[in-house]
Amino acid sequence: MHSSSLGRPMPSASRRTVLRGIGGAAVLGAGIPLLSACGGSGSGSGTASDPKTVSLGSNASDAVPKKAFAEIYAAFTKQSGITVDVNTKDHNTFQEQINTYLQGTPDDVFNWFAGYRMQFFAAKGLASPIDDVWQKIGGNFPEAMKALSKGADGKYYFVPISTSLWGVFYRKSVFEKYGYEVPTTWDQLVALCKQMKKDGLVPFAFGDKDAWPALGTFDQINFRTNGYDFHVELMAGKASWTDAKVRTAFDHWAEILPYHQEGAVGRTWQDAAQTLISKKAGMYLFGSFVAQQFTNKADLDDLDFFPFPEIDSAHGQDTVEAPTDGFMLSKAPKNKDGALKLLEFLGTPEAEQIYLKSDPSLVAASNKADTSSYTPLQKKAYETIAGAKHLTQFMDRDSRPDFTSTVMQPALQKFVRDPKGVDSLLASIERQKKTIFASA
């Protein structure tokens, strides 16, 4: 379990508390306080209807993002005279109870995630469209970020604030020492893996003990092999896992799996990162938050990344996995005018700049943000995201969380342990997918 504000995936359901529905509402153990709106949580009952107060449901319970958002809200209050009454809940509890929360009397505005997870609540009528806000902030964002913020009906429901990136991370000094060149095609990547192995390196660091890192590997290989449109359909349960296209993606994965660190299912992602830090591994396909493991500045300065190489020239490298966090407007906000003003402010480069000063592990979602204080790694991530034709979120944000946690995580761990028997594995995934996606 971990904060998704770093671009990591959402909390997984255990087999004891399987997530109920796309929103992630879980069967919760006794003693966990229910998520409720500010007015009903003892933090000032009735204040939500005050025209000078906007209530906000926040999942930013970790110290860094909590402080960063507090500074944004203070700046908004100074500008507008409107107070933001923040209802902060533990990050994981917020996600587990979001479905019930939104069907009750939620706060005016709430933290959530772009893409499929946002679209689900929009389609259920549990969020309000904010096209008026986007008429004012639209010029601050690239086209791919705009697409992430729209519901299936074409209306806007989401204001992005920050994003991160998944790519292939490496040490510049290692590439220089051995004379390696950054691969841009699949054949070049395979050849590089073979050369690294000859040179005594582990080509790919890999740790999947927590079961979610492999989801990111599949994402990259699938949208490079089959394109963004098919990937989105597969994640949404519309395409079949027994489609020959999916088998082709797994065949590609099986080709480079021998060049991954052995025993991955018993290794954490942090331990895998240590092999890159110690220069025992040549590459690491992971999220940009891997940089947090590089505690020595010289090591961090030596860290670089490249987008996952092209597999099919029809799709090139046009898709980037960039988990994006932001805000939505609830179904019936008590102070709608104030809430719209807050969302408009949150969509400005100014708001993003305030946030990123406090949390430099991320990059701005806006293409108008001031990047002068960015590290070279942040600048490269920012430019890569801004230049992408399509943005995905990560499997458990682009699909149902109950499907990814109870079906895909164990299935991919099984594949990593033994890549044989793919056809039966995919048939099993498809059977379970049909059952889960047919449920409420």
Image (tube, rainbow, N blue to C red):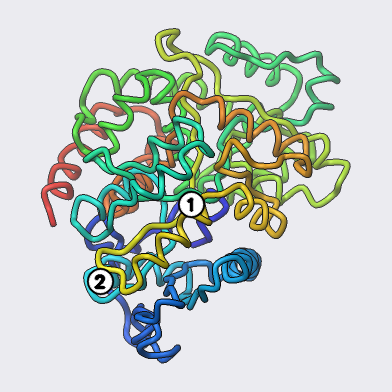
Q: What percent of the width, then of the height, locates residue 228? A: 37, 25
Q: Nearer the viewer, residue 100 or 72?
A: 72
Q: Is residue 210 left or right of residue 298?
A: left
* Label number found at residue 100: 2
Q: Amino acid at mark 2?
A: Thr
- Residue 110 figure quarter: bottom left
Q: What percent of the width, then of the height, locates residue 420? A: 35, 27
Residue in view at x 69 percent, y 31 percent? 380
For numbered disc 1, what is the local secondary structure?
strand
Depicted 116 relative to depicted 70: above or below: above
Task: Report the quarter where the C terminus lies.
Answer: bottom left
- Residue 398 figure quarter: top left
Depicted 346 relative to depicted 155: above or below: below
Q: What percent of the width, then of the height, locates residue 209? A: 51, 51
Are there few (<14), some (14-19), or many (20+) residues within 10 Å of tag 1? many
Residue in view at x 56 percent, y 36 percent? 166
* Label number found at residue 325: 1
Real-space Cα separation, disc 1 to disc 2, in angstroms: 20 Å
